[in-house]
Image (tube, rainbow, N blue to C red):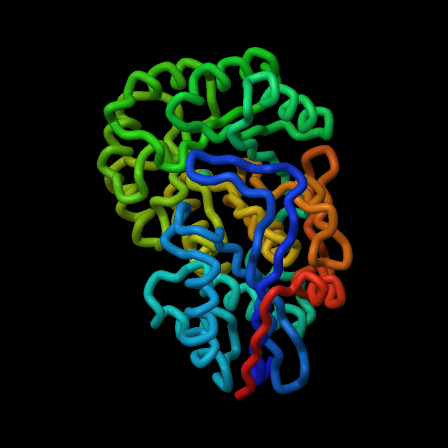
Amino acid sequence: MSAIRVDRVELRRVRLPLIHRFRTSSHAKRELEHILVALTDADGAVGWGEIASPSGPFYSAETVASCWAVARDHLTPLVLGREWEHPAELAGAMARVRGNHFARAGFDMAAWALWTAKGGVPLAAALGGTRPSVEAGVSLGIEASVDELVEQVAARVAEGYRRVKLKIAPGWDVAPTRTVKAVFPEISVHVDANGAYSLDDLGVFRELDGLGLTMIEQPFAPRALVDHAVLQGLIGTPVCLDESVEEPDDLITALRLGAVRILNVKVSRMGGLTPAVRVHDLARAEGVPVWCGGMHEFGIGRAANVALSALPGFTLPSDVSGSAKYYRRDVTTTPVTCVNGVVVVPSEPGLGWHPDIGFIASRTLQAESAQG
Ligand code: MG
C-alpha cells in the first residue's frame, strides 16, 4: 500500500449518559465525555479513534481537558502532513510526546482504523488476532448494599456472563466478595482495588486469598511494584497489574521483580494498539496470561478493544462487554453486542463498526479541526 498522509484532524468532545451509575473508590459517574478523533487522508478516507480518558485525574494523570489540549496542541501537528506506511511509524512519531497515553491512543487507534480500511483487512487480523470471537466479562462498581450487588451480578449471569469483576475499596472488600462467591459458585470472580490499599492491609488480602478468586487486580499504588512482589510472595491468588503498566518497560520491571502473574492490557493506558500489541507479545513470551480491560469506551474504542482481544495471548475473558450495558445509544451505527458473554470479532475491513455521524454531531459539546 502506498504511503498515507493525513490532511485533516478533527476532534470532537462527545457526551453520553450512562445507564447505570458506576462507582469506584474515587468517583461516581452518571455520564461520560470522551474525545473522538477523525483522521482524513489525502484520498478522503477517514479513520476514527477514541480518547477514553476519565474526566478527572483519578485513574491516570490524564483528564478530558488535558487530552484535548495535548491532542490539539501537540499530537495534531505531529500527525498532519506526515507520510507513513504503517501505523507503528505514526506511533513512533507520537512517542516524542511523553506520557499522555490516552490522548495518543485515540490517534493510534484512528491510524489503525484508517490503514486497515484502506488495505481491505479486518483490524483484528492486522493486529495478529486469531480468535473469531472473544469472551467478555463484566465489571461491577461499588453498590449501595451487598443485596444490590448480588442483584447486579444475578442480572449479568442471566445475560450469559460467566466472569464478574468486583471493584473493592477499604470497607467494601471481603464481605461482598465472599457473598458473591457463595451465591454464584459457578462463575469466575476477581477483584480490582484500583490501588486503594497498602501492605498495611495484608489481613484483607490473606482473607481474599482464601476465596478462590481468579486474581487480585492492582491492590497497591501504581508505582509500588516492590510491594506487589511482596504480596505475591505471600498469597497464592495471582496478582494482576493494571495501572502499574503504562509502558512495555514497566512490565519488564514487574516480571523481574515477581510482581505480576496476570496482566490487564488497556489500549488507552498503553497509548494505543501499537504498544498494546507489544506488551501482549512480551507477556505471552513470558507465559503471563493477559486480558483486555476497558474504560467504558464508546463504540469506537470498544471496537478497538474487541480487535485487540482476538490476539492469542488474551486467554482470559475481557472487560469488553456489549455497549448496551452502558449506553442506550452508542456512537456507532450498530452497537457492539455481547451474546451469552461472547462478542463476535468482525471480519470486514477496518474497525468493523461505523460511526453514526448524525448522532455524534447531536452529542458533540466541542469540536475543532485542523488542515495540513
Ligand atoms: Mg483495573
Q: Within the displayed image, which quadrant is ligand 1 positioned in?
A: top left
* Of residues 26 and 221, the one drawn nearer to the viewer in this rendering: 26
Q: Residue at x 70, y 53 (%)?
A: 330
Instruction: Tell whether 253 sits left or right of 278.
Output: left
Tag count: 0
x and y percent of residue 146 in the render? 55, 18
174 up-or-down from 79: above or below: above
Q: Nearer the viewer, residue 61 or 244?
A: 61
**Front position in the image: 274 or 326:** 326
Q: Quadrant of the N terminus?
A: bottom right
Tell me where residue 353 appears, x and y as whole percent: 71, 59
Q: Position of residue 368 (x, y in %)?
A: 56, 76
Residue found 48% across the figure and 62% down from its top:
105
Taking the view exactly as shown, the residue that stands out farthest to the top is 182
Q: Does 157 sit above or below residue 181?
A: below
Vertical comparison of 240 with 59: above or below: above
Residue 334: name its quadrant: bottom right
The image shows residue 210 at horizontal and vertical percentages of 41, 14
Q: Is residue 27 left or right of residue 249?
A: right
